[in-house]
Image (tube, rainbow, N blue to C red):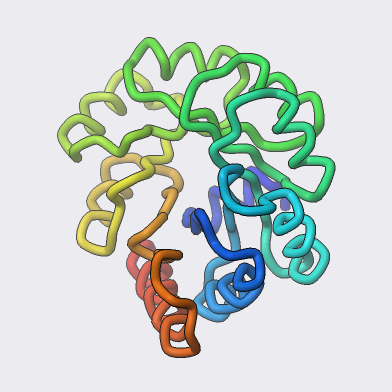
Amino acid sequence: MTILKQILHHKIIAIIRGADPGNALDIVHALYEGGIRILEITRNSPDALKVIQAVEKEMGNLVTIGAGTVLDGETAKAAISVGAKFIISPIVEEETIKATKQNGAVSIPGAYTPSEIVRAHLYGGDIIKIFPSPSLSYFKNLYGPFQDIMFMPTGGIDLDNIVEFKNAGAVAFGIGSSLVDTRHKITDEYLNNIKVKAQQFVVAIK
């Protein structure tokens, strides 16, 4: 199964932002035990490239790891070189998309307006991250004229609204602090909480 097909199959991308590198693998294990198979390590996390490399080395046969908050082509190439299989951006940046595609990874640029969405798609974005996640009504209005473009709402997606966004046409979801909040102390109890939440998200979209 290609990386793009894996994302479309599993749908949930768990965003790990700002985690202490020493806790990252424990978080990944908890997410995996909860059924999550696609993970994003954000570029602005401590030692992000080393964390991506460590996760890929230990869990690469079990999960698909990508890099998020990528703003330029050089960072995209660096992340791919250590194991990232997809690159997510909060913006439409042509060189980032091109570098991602040229190096064999899936490109998920971020856009909000219709013009940004079309530009991201024309540059080669595989899935367009709708960011910040709009209201459901705004998302429906966006999806209406662009049903040939795959949308992934990110930011503000939780257990209360994920099914509504799925029914409105979303093909995948970026799930951040409503699944993994690295501001919490990473204890055994909190890791179990991550596992339980992951299970709830997985069940919700089936």
Q: Nearer the viewer, residue 107 or 145?
A: 107
Residue at x 61% of width, y 14% of height: 94
Residue at 42% across / 89% down in the picture? 189
At x 45% / y 86%, what residue is drawn?
192
| Drawn side of residue 19 relative to residue 48, left or right | left
Residue 74 higher or lower than 151, as above or below: above
Q: Is residue 137 left or right of residue 204?
A: left
* Total residue callouts: 0
Above or below: residue 25 compared with residue 142: below
Identify the image quadrant of residue 59.
bottom right
Say whether residue 28 is left or right of residue 60.
left
The quarter of the displayed image where residue 96 is located: top right
Spot occupied by residue 103 in the image (x, y as percentages of width and height): 81, 30
Q: Position of residue 193 (x, y in %)?
A: 39, 81
Q: Is residue 101 above or below residue 182?
A: above
| In the foreground, 27 or 23 | 23
Q: Identify the residue shown where x is 32% and y is 49%.
A: 166
* 112, 149: nearer the viewer: 112
The quadrant of the rendering that contains the C terminus is bottom left
Name the residue at the left extreme.
137
Place of residue 117 in the rendered image (x, y in percent of width and height, measured from the top left): 42, 19
Residue 2 visible here: no
Q: Is residue 120 visible?
A: yes
Q: Position of residue 42 (x, y in %)?
A: 57, 47
